[in-house]
């Protein structure tokens, strides 16, 4: 389970604002956010098992993030890792619309995902688990959004709670990393009454219903807060989280962007 709350073109001062948790097995090897030596313009964590990333930014002005789509009918291992999609986009010169169009021929190579791709003032969304009109890539209108392990804005309790919290942060004059981390920091489990309307009624559903998951085997591994300012600079902070729920490391950087740079 993962959680991304974000505001797109809601504020002229902060055209993109993101607060996110990456949830994963604690045994899965991971490198914290860093500048990748082979791609120095890229700032992202790295999944050391499959090689990709769940979220990153680039000095070329791009942003990308991905979540897994929870679908019990699609548990078979897929030929390719979802994390390569974010990495490929961040490193390419292809526009988001064309990138997603090119992806349509190979979406079945990946397990279920929801993908966010940003360049300039545009932010695109696509899920290979959508149906009907929801199965097509689309640019997002200005607004506050929430994404977990279902389609965009599926009203899971943690998503609705986060959208409300992010809206309150945006109502202030200035944002900061601590305020944004609190948007995805609630450790309270949702009640059965809150979960049932979304078809979430198992013990695992309740354990994973908190925004910030603390569990010895599987839980929140990183909290990332990020915004792009009116000068197109990205302000990034990633906090690495131990199985105990304690912060064990922090990476904070500001990256000035220049479209097209490598």
Image (cartoon, grey):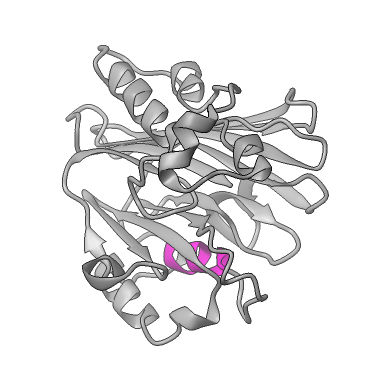
Q: Is residue 149 above or below residue 131?
A: above
Q: Is residue 39 left or right of residue 163?
A: right
Q: Is residue 178 left or right of residue 99?
A: right
Q: Looking at the image, which residue is at 41% across and 68% down?
A: 129
**Front-lying residue, 33 or 223:** 223
Magenta region: 82-90
Q: Is 206 a magenta residue?
A: no
Q: Looking at the rendering, in which quadrant would you find the C terminus?
A: bottom left
* Position in image of residue 98 (x %, y %): 27, 75
* Position in image of residue 27 (x %, y %): 83, 49
Q: Is residue 165 above or below residue 195?
A: above
Q: Is residue 222 left or right of residue 160?
A: right
Q: Looking at the image, which residue is at 73% across and 26% down?
A: 245
Q: Quadrant of residue 116?
A: bottom left
Q: Quadrant of residue 175?
A: top left
Q: Is residue 138 left or right of residue 175?
A: left
């Amino acid at each position: 389970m993962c959680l991304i709350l974000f505001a797109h073109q809601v504020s002229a001062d902060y055209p993109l604002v993101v607060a996110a948790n990456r949830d994963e097995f604690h045994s899965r090897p991971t490198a914290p956010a860093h500048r990748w030596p082979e791609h120095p313009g890229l700032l992202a964590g790295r999944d050391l098992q499959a090689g990709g990333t769940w979220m990153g930014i680039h000095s070329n002005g791009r942003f990308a993030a991905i979540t897994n789509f929870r679908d019990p009918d699609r548990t078979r291992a897929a030929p390719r890792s979802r994390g390569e999609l974010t990495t490929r986009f961040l490193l390419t010169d292809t526009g988001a619309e064309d990138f997603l169009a090119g992806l349509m021929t190979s979406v079945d190579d990946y397990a279920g995902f929801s993908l966010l791709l940003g360049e300039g003032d545009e932010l695109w969304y696509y899920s290979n688990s959508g149906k009907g009109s929801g199965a097509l890539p689309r640019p997002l209108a200005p607004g506050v959004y929430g994404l977990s392990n279902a389609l965009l804005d599926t009203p899971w309790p943690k998503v609705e709670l986060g959208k409300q919290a992010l809206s309150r942060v945006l109502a202030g004059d200035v944002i900061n990393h601590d305020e944004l981390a609190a948007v995805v920091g609630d450790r309270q489990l949702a009640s059965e009454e809150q979960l049932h309307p979304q078809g979430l009624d198992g013990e695992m559903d309740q354990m994973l219903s908190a925004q910030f998951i603390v569990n010895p085997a599987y839980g929140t591994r990183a909290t990332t807060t990020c915004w792009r300012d009116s000068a197109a600079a990205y302000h990034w902070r990633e906090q690495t989280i131990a199985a105990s729920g304690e912060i064990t490391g922090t990476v904070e950087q500001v990256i000035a962007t220049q479209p097209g740079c490598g």
